[in-house]
Image (cartoon, rainbow, N blue to C red):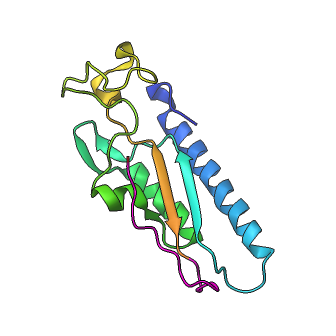
Amino acid sequence: QATYANYMVAECLQIRLNQLREVVAFTRKQWASHDGARSWPVLVAGDFNCNARRAYNDSSSSDEYNLVTSVLRDLGNPRDLVFEFCGYHPPTYSDTYDDAGLMPKEQVLTAPEDCEVDQTRQRLDFVFWFDPEVPGPGGVFQPTFARV
């Protein structure tokens, strides 16, 4: 659930967190159909409509991102592969050439008229990895590379 107006921020945040809880419950239900501990890795990926960046010029983790990873901990230890590879939260939507945020780098999904400083350089897309609970027959597969 995206947030389209400032007066809807709290409500939309709760909707997003509830949607994520549904993903966690669905995933856990799938695991329950197997006997014993999970021997395969799990990827949870997509556009979460959560900006992981604190601000357009601050790529440290936002409060909402911390809430998202907290919910995902019900599945295990979520490894954010993009953050691990880059060491920061790179923009995945509305990246701009300048700090004023007036010229988007890509102009297929981001129109210049959509660029406002508080809406640029957002990281909305994620790839979370969960290690197997026990090694499978072929050992433990580990991701070694991620690219934005």
**Magenta span main SS:** loop
- Residue pictured at 58% horizontal, 78% vertical: 132
Residue 18 lies, with reference to residue 145, above or below; the image says: above
Residue 51 lies, with reference to residue 106, above or below; the image says: below
Residue 106 lies, with reference to residue 133, above or below; the image says: above
Q: How many marks?
A: 0
- Residue pictured at 57% horizontal, 45% vertical: 16
- Residue pictured at 58% horizontal, 71% vertical: 41
Residue 97 lies, with reference to residue 76, above or below; the image says: above
Front-most of 52 and 36?
Answer: 36
Residue 12, given in percent of the width and then of the height, sits at: 55, 37
Q: Which residues are magenta?
A: 132-147
Front-most of 148 and 111?
Answer: 148
Q: Quadrant of residue 136?
A: bottom right
11 within the magenta span: no
Q: Quadrant of residue 35?
A: bottom right
Front-most of 20 and 110?
Answer: 110
Q: Is residue 105 left or right of residue 76?
A: left
133 within the magenta span: yes
Residue 145, given in percent of the width and then of the height, sits at: 39, 61
Q: Quadrant of residue 58?
A: top left
**In which quadrant of the rendered image does the N terminus lie?**
top right
Q: Is residue 82 left or right of residue 56?
A: right
Residue 89, given in percent of the width and then of the height, sits at: 32, 49
